[in-house]
Image (tube, coloured by chain):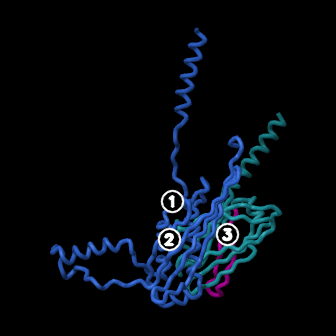
Chain colours: A cyan, B blue
Amino acid sequence: MKKAVIYLSLFSITSVFFTGCTAPNAMQTKTDIVTGKSTVRTQTSNPVLATRIGVSKVNMTTLGDIKRASLALKNGWFYAQDFQYKVVWFDAEGTEINPEGAIWKPISLQGREVKTIQSVAPNPSAVDVLIYMKKD
Amino acid sequence: MKIKSLFMITAMSSAALFSGCASQTVSYGDAQSVETLTKDFGSTDLQQIATKMVDDMLAFPPIIDMTKNRRPVLFVDKIKNKSQEHIDTESITDTIQNRLINSGKFRFVDMTSVGAVADQMAYQQRSGMVDKRTAVQSGSQIGAEYMLNGNLSSIVKNSGGKSDVYYKFTLKLLNLKTGIVEWTSEKEIRKSAKKSTFGL
């Protein structure tokens, strides 16, 4: 009986754990209107991916009047990580721009690798990005 | 005899039962998700190509200067499909055109609609059925300044149970007046497939 309870508990915990593996992670930039400096805020719903992949650097540049976001994704794990990411742009009011135009892109990071992803804003009104990550 | 009849009935019942199992379930999916059904050219490849081309074009410094105070007029020429597959390259250029227009930096003339436009203008001017004060007059269209064209090629390799396909899409922006290629970019995609043993 004790063994059955232990096995059931372990199974339940494992199920909850792997359910989180299919949910996307999200990281969002917040641009200060006065200074123009961008910071990254992390929203985590996938604990496994969140512990392994992080943003080591964020850079927001302006091309004419259109913004370009460069984010360095770092694999903190020693083994290769294959996952997908999607970049969504927001205007100053927080409204998502062209929500159906953002595509999921596959990416592979080798152990401890830092790879920069870039995204150009769809139009001049876009100021901030939200990066979703998921692992199927 | 009884056993034989029993086997016959069991076999026929099983056949009827399993034929009902071969039903199809349909559901909507995310059009922006990664598709890896086969290694053939797919929706994810089209989307990746369009995104890269548009991002590169908007980020190129001479293009930024060109579009600072005005919106140049472009037209899209055919993309040559040099791959071994049947690929609708117009679909790729439609997506590119859509994103460039929505960026607010470019305008396009649609060469695929020239015939239909000519028919409509002839109808308005000569049919006698349209008020001449509202009919569109010929000779007022804006001419394109630049042309977008390119190529899509592929290299396919097979070895045993493994196969690999490499796509390369190249796009160029040509100045119609000077003949100079003002901008070019390419996107490379590699897809691999492996046949598993015993379907495992």
Q: Which residue is drawn at 47% across and 74% down?
A: B97
Quarter occupied by residue B60: bottom right
Q: Which residue is drawn at 74% across and 45% down?
A: A12
Q: Which of marks 1 and 3 is in front?
A: 1
Q: Where is residue A40 in the image (x, y as percent from the top left)?
A: 69, 74
Q: Where is residue A98 in the image (x, y as percent from the top left)?
A: 51, 70
Rendered view: B16 above or below A58 = above
At label 2, the amino acid type is Ile
**Looking at this view, is B157 or B65 the one in front?**
B157
Callout 2: 10 Å neighbours few (<14), some, many (20+)?
Answer: some
Q: Residue A39 carries which label?
A: none
**Looking at this view, is A9 or B165 the one in front?**
B165
Give the structural element (helix, strand or loop) at label 3: strand
Callout 3: 10 Å neighbours few (<14), some, many (20+)?
Answer: some
The residue wearing badge 2 is B79
At label 1, the amino acid type is His
Q: What stretch is highlighted in magenta?
A: A27-44
**Looking at this view, is A122 or B115 the one in front?**
B115
Q: Residue at x 82, y 41 (%)?
A: A6
Q: Residue at x 69, y 58 (%)?
A: A135
Is B12 covered by the magenta stretch?
no
The residue wearing badge 3 is A27
Is A42 covered by the magenta stretch?
yes
Asked if labels 3 and 2 share a chain, the reply is no
Give the structural element (helix, strand or loop) at label 2: strand
The alpha-carbon separation of the residues under discs 1 and 3 comes to 39 Å
The number of numbered discs placed on residues in the rendered structure image is 3
Q: Residue B86 carries which label?
A: 1
In this picture, residue B74 sits left or right of residue A32: left
Chain letter of disc 1?
Answer: B
